[in-house]
Every structure is written in C-alpha cells, then in structure tokens.
Image (cartoon, rainbow, N blue to C red):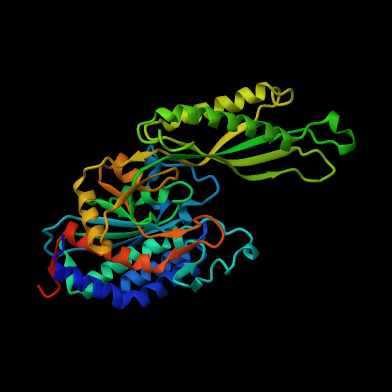
C-alpha cells in the first residue's frame, strides 16, 4: 500500500483539484447523454483526455465486431453505429507494474417529467454538499473519480508503472454492449475497476437482467359493442399478471441460492413501458409492453428466456382470444448473466487497503439486485472485476444526487488503489 508520504501527496492533490473535479462533473451532468444521444459527451471526453496526453481511441459498437461474441445483446431500438466508446490509454514507457482498466458508463436513463424534480434534471445544481441531476449519481460521479484519481497521481509527481486504460462506455443501462465492445476491440488488463456508486462498498454479487417486449394484437370495434371485439391492453394486463405469478414462484426458488437466500425477493419483474390503442372510444387493436426481469448468478439466460416464453404461452392458452391470437415475446435488450466476485482476490485486497487508508474504515460488501458491467470481465475474459465507487441517492428517480464530500474521499481511495496495484515511478525518472 502507498506509504504515508505518498498518501499525503495524493490527498493534497485530490484536495487541490476538487473544485475542478466538481466543474468537470457538472459538465458531464449537463450533457443529456440519453441512449442514442451520447456522442457529444463522448467527444467532450475524448478531447479532455487528449489534452492531458492520453492516447485516445473513439469507436462505435458497430466497429468492434461484438456480433462475434455469444454474450452480445440485441439493440432493437438503438443504432450500434451511433453508439460511441472512448478508451484513453496512458502507457508506461518501461512497464514494471500491473495494468488496469478504469471503466465508467456515461449513458443515463430518461429523466421523467421535469416539473417533478426540485432542480432541473440537467442543471447540475449543488446544494448543501450534494450535486443534483440525472446521471450525477449513476454514474458520472464515478467517471469523475476515476479521471481525477489519475490527475491526482500525476499532480503528486508520479506515473503508474503499468498501463492504465480509462474507458467511458455506453449501453450499460440497456445491453452492456459498450463494455463488450472495448473487450472485442482488444483492450485487456490485469484487473478492472468500475466505480459505480456503491457507497464505498465492493459489489460481491449482482443479478442478471433480461429485457423483452410483449406484443399483443386485438380486434377493434366501437366501444358501444365492445363485447364483439377484443381489448389488446386488457389482454396484455392478463399476461402481466401471469408474469407476476411466474416471478413469485422464481423468488420462492431463490431462497435456496447461496448468495441471494437472505435477500427478500431478489428477482425483480417490472413492466416499464406500455403503448397501445389509437382511440378512447375504440377497443385497442394493439398493445406493447416493455418488461425487465432479473435472474440469479448461475442461471442460464436461455433457460430463463424459455421460462418467460412458457409463462406467456400458458397464460395465452387460458384466454379465449389469445389462445387463437398468440402474443409475441421479442428480446429487445439485456441478455445479461448474474455475476459473483468470489472473495479473496489480490485485487480486492489491494482495494480494501486503499479504502481503509482513505476512509479510515473497513470496506464493506454489498449484494445487489441490479446489473453492472463487471460480468463481462469476470465471467468471459477471466479478469478480476471490482465494482466500487462513490455514494448518492435516487438512481433512476427524481432528484438524483451525489454526495460531493464522499466523492472526494472516493477519488483518493481510487488513486491509492491505482498506485498500489500498478506501482509508480517518478515523473522525473
């Protein structure tokens, strides 16, 4: 671990640059980097990295050949050729240490009605030590931490003794294909740290995620004779109820899972978007429902898909109209495995020491029912994959915010981790 003099120099450097880091984070938050609209922010970051001497690679998902990997997810509602990734590389001229990937996603979820926010969602307002805004918490704060951890190391007079790759990716909120694209592009390291907002804990396990779209068709008639037609929205509701029961049964089985047995109902089902019908006085002829469901580490994606399809088919057979007009299930996003970071890796030990030095407390662990990108590195490319980062509130909700004081200490912890994991040389050497 860094000695007290090096840690003090890192801490001074983080403190000295923190106002700049807050401005940097505010710039990130002000970019409305919704799905399909991330390119301006990626261009901004590519310029920022280049100005600081990084070698910058900007490429699209379509450039990376992810279709050759079995864990790529379908991008039904997005264009891979317009989804850009940035990898900024700082190479050591005489590498004697271990290499590292620091990766963060810059895509954000829709903000909902702006009038329901206390502060406009892209204002990056700062109040009482918190920055508010869509993405401030999930996870642009973590992106700022990894960038300014590297800035602090440089300002303290050091250079990592191993190659470091700073990666800003898209599609984390919908497929994970951005992270996969960097791997298919050829980027590898001895470990990866993803500074998702974990509140200073290590993510021990995350569930997987599946996205699918239910498509239902009906027979439109005037509502005055509704009994002679069908109602696609009500048919879709029938399927949603069946999937709720399917989820209940899956959560009963989850009580036997070695990592999730103590987590109440870890498999989450959510009908998140509904579209249907054309006229209030006509029975709707169509309905589409976009859904999300979780799966546990160790479960096969294909097996869970078959379970969903069976549940929908059985519910359709029990309905007079759907039995003769079967609904469709379209897989339109995440086909993501769950992942467990087994305890005891050297990388985790180094991070735990860095956290202890920065915060003065032991690093806790969390088990989450959401997904993150560590699965690509840990499951498919055999790399130690750590998920650890700052603290905030209201991810995907109104008044999303990040704790700025905690962010500063997290930045120091990440800097200390880089120094210990990669080793350092003096810039003057």
- Quadrant for the N terminus, please: bottom left
Can residue 185 be spotted in the picture? no
In this view, 185 is above or below 163: above
From the top left corner, tell me how far across and down residue 173 is, in percent.
47, 51
Can residue 85 be spotted in the picture? yes
Q: Is residue 3 left or right of residue 60?
A: left
Q: Is residue 139 left or right of residue 312?
A: left
- Quadrant for the C terminus, please: bottom left
From the top left corner, tell me how far across and down residue 142 is, in percent.
37, 61
From the top left corner, tell me how far across and down residue 43 is, in percent.
42, 67
Q: Is residue 269 left or right of residue 369?
A: right
405, 278: nearer the viewer: 405
- Residue beneath the point at 13% across and 60% down: 95
115, 105: nearer the viewer: 115
In this view, 190 is above or below 94: above
How many labels were placed on the picture?
0
From the top left corner, tell me how far across and down residue 11 is, in percent.
24, 71
Hey, which quadrant is residue 221 in on the image? top right
- Residue beneath the point at 49% across and 36% down: 265
- Residue beneath the point at 24% across and 53% down: 352
């Amino acid at each position: 671990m860094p000695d007290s003099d090096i840690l003090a120099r890192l801490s001074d450097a983080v403190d000295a640059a923190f106002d700049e880091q807050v401005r940097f984070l505010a710039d990130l938050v002000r970019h409305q980097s919704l799905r399909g609209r991330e390119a301006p922010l990626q261009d901004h970051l590519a310029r920022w990295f280049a100005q600081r001497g990084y070698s910058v690679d900007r490429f699209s998902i379509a450039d990376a050949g992810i279709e050759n990997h079995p864990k790529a997810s379908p991008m039904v509602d997005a264009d891979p050729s317009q989804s850009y990734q940035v990898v900024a590389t700082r190479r050591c001229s005489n590498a004697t240490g271990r290499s590292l990937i620091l990766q963060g996603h810059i895509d954000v979820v829709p903000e909902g009605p702006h009038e329901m926010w206390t502060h406009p969602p892209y204002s990056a307002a700062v109040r009482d030590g918190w920055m508010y805004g869509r993405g401030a918490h999930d996870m642009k704060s973590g992106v700022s931490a990894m960038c300014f951890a590297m800035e602090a190391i440089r300002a303290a007079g050091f250079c990592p003794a191993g190659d470091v790759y700073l990666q800003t990716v898209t599609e984390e909120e919908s497929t994970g294909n951005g992270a996969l694209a960097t791997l298919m592009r050829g980027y590898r390291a001895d470990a990866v740290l993803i500074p998702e907002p974990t509140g200073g804990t290590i993510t021990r396990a995350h569930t997987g995620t599946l996205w699918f779209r239910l498509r239902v068709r009906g027979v439109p008639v005037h509502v005055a004779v509704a009994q002679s037609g069908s109602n696609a929205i009500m048919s879709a509701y029938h399927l949603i109820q069946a999937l709720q029961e399917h989820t209940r049964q899956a959560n009963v089985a989850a009580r036997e899972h070695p990592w999730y047995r103590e987590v109440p109902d870890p498999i989450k089902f959510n009908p998140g978007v509904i579209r249907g019908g054309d006229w209030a006085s006509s029975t709707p002829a169509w309905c589409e429902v976009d859904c999300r469901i979780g799966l546990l580490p160790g479960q096969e994606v294909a097996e869970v898909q078959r379970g969903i399809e069976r549940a929908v088919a059985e519910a359709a057979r029990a309905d007079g109209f759907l039995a003769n007009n079967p609904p469709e299930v379209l897989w339109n996003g995440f086909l993501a495995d769950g992942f467990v970071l087994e305890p005891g890796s050297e990388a985790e030990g180094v991070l735990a020491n860095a956290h202890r030095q920065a915060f003065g407390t032991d690093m806790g662990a969390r088990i989450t029912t959401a997904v993150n990108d560590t699965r690509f590195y840990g499951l498919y490319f055999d790399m130690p994959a750590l998920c650890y980062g700052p603290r905030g509130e209201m991810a995907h909700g109104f008044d999303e915010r990040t704790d700025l004081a905690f962010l500063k200490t997290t930045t120091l912890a990440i800097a200390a981790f880089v120094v210990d994991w990669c080793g350092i040389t003096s810039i003057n050497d």
